[in-house]
Amino acid sequence: MQDRRSFINLFVRGSFLTGLAFLSGALILRKKEGEFCGLDFGCNRCDKSESCNLPEASLYRETVWQLDPAKCIQCGRCATSCVMTPSAVKCTHVYAMCGYCDLCGGYLKPDTKNISTAAENQLCPTNAIKRKFVEEPFFEYEIDEALCIGCGKCVKGCSAFGNGSLQLQVRHNRCQNCNQCSIARVCPSDAYSRVPASKPYLLKGIEQDSTTAPKINLGEKGV
Amino acid sequence: MKTLRLLIFLVLLSTIQTSTYAIQRFPKPEFESGYTQPQTLMPHGRAEILSYLDVAVLIIALTFISWVIIRKRSRNWVFWTSMFSLAYFGFYREGCVCAIGSIQNVSLALFDSSYVIPVTVIAFFILPLVYTLLFGRTFCAGVCPFGAMQDLVAFRPQKLGTRLNAILGIIPYLYLGLAILYAATGTDFIICRYDPFVGIFRLNASFGMFFFAGTLLVSGIFIARPYCRFLCPYGVLLNWFSRFSRQHMTITPAHCIQCRLCENSCPYDAIEIPLTEKNPENRKTRVKKLIIIIFLLPLLTFTGGWTASLLHTSLAGVHSKVKLARQVLHPVKDEKQAETFEIQAYKSSGKPEAQVYQEALVVLERFKTGSWWVGSFMGLVFGLLIAGKMLKKYDPDYVPNKGRCFSCAKCVDYCPVKPEKN
């Protein structure tokens, strides 16, 4: 009786272990759908990445969440749906694209009666955009990340009336990299996706060089 | 120059209705004052190498806790190991990624070949199962931060009785089934979304989640480890694996002397009351029971699958593609907002209407198959639980139920028997 029971136990244990081995083997070694060149973000789906010499290929396993500004419609849910308060999504200013306008579509409300920088004329609800005079007639706009809540109001204004240099991005020093991003779940335009951790940002107007990415960062939270 | 810009601005204001993305409307200025343009900062997240460190810590913690439980047999050591895990996997790593949530990554990876599952997540899924197969649920005892947190508040554990334990014990199976269904269809990761303790680890969550966590912890004073026993979907897998484990924690270090001191020591009602009589019922009743079980199992499996398949449209209702198709079909009339953000995004994407419906139909079809599987699984589980209640196992000693026991070693201190000296 005892022998029979221990034999059954051994048999089931063996089959469970084999099952686990097969499962992990299948998950690691299976062919990925679609083939892209290593120069694309799709390198995590490329089955040639084992033999690829590009720096991304060695780091393709870990993923982070990324917001595609081209798909974003600035619905404002990034500000409210993130597990963090305030949200880990912030407005990011691509200075290289900025026109340094005096009448900034991202800074001022479009329907202001008299043009002044008074608080009631500013788009940003938290006064996170710092306006600094550079030279006649240019002004520099800087995002104060500690104040920005990621509502995207300035982004909407800038893309409608300006160059589109203000773009929403997941800030990876704040992002918890949740298993399932709670903003991605409610994003109406499917702008969120998992990307290789070596290329975390996607900004129009900036080419990102992944080789400059720090190899070790102890994950300090920028507060 | 300034007036010109103002003019352009006003003209644009009047003409542009829809938002167009990133057009160089205003040329980049040429500065004369020697102004240098600042860099756009793009700070990186946690270095990838650290996630391999997490796996190393997991292996070390699992090995250590298994040694403590099987060889050292000390509740104190188990407690301090679990405190380390609570600090590291809980408050330092902030509960992500955990073994419980990794079920969803694995299911998504199995059903969606475009999703690449990180090796570290596979490790977090597989390793606790392997250790459970060897040593019992040592993961629950000392590595899982959820268990450690609930063990901290279990001051006045009450006995729930076998019936209530069995009924509430069905919930994890349902949770597991739904979690796999929703992950496999790419809908949502419900385990992560309704994770009560991650908000405590982050010290940041919605009121609802804090309330849920508070309820669990307060009820955890009287019902020890409520999440582990009556919710945890990973616990279902650990339960199955632990039943066939090679070694398992024992209450007594040598031979049970039937002193009954440990009888009430388990806060999780995991100690089986001994069944001393070898054959308490005659052959005829046992055969009758077996026949009932053989007929009951397929019947329950089919009924479960059929019932769940009737619900597949409501289950699929939360999938974003099904939601969008519904909104396109029946646009919401609301004074506050002319059209929802989903409709706005759909219109600006220029996707044909037929494609929206087609995609929703594909999702619905997948949910139909999926709900058959989940329903059948639930029926089978229900049948097996009934079967388990009907057939009793002969065991004269006080032993922990290998499936339900968390190997926390609380009962060990109650046993007066000293280990035999070799």
Image (cartoon, coloured by chain):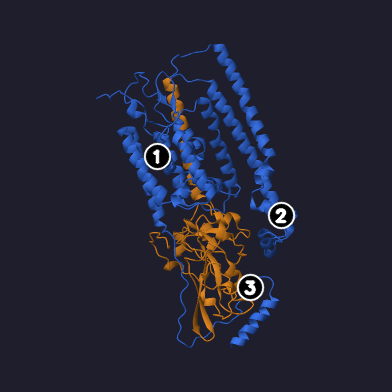
Chain colours: A orange, B blue
Badge 3 vs badge 2, beta-carbon distance below 8 Å? no
Q: Residue at x 53, y 61 (%)?
A: A66
Q: Which mark is residue A160?
A: 3
Q: Nearer the viewer, residue B306 or A165?
A: A165
**Where A162 sits versus B144, above or below?**
below
Front tag of 3 and 1: 1
Q: Chain of mark 1?
A: B
- Which residue carries the number 1 mark? B152
Which percent across, then down, holds residue A198? 46, 62
As drawn, B411 above or below B55? above
Q: Secondary structure at mark 1?
A: helix
Dot in front, 2 or 1: 1
Spatial CA span between label 3 and label 1: 54 Å
Q: Closer to the camera, A171 or B53? A: A171
User: Do the residues at pointers 3 and 1 share their chain?
Assistant: no
Q: Amino acid at mark 1?
A: Leu
Image quadrant containing the C terminus of chain B: top left
Q: Amino acid at mark 3?
A: Ala
**Rendering coords of residue A127 (x, y %):** 52, 70
Q: CA distance from mark 3 to mark 2?
A: 26 Å
Q: Is residue A156 left or right of residue B260?
A: right
Report which residue position mark 2 lands on: B327
Vertical order, B202 against A132 (above or below): above
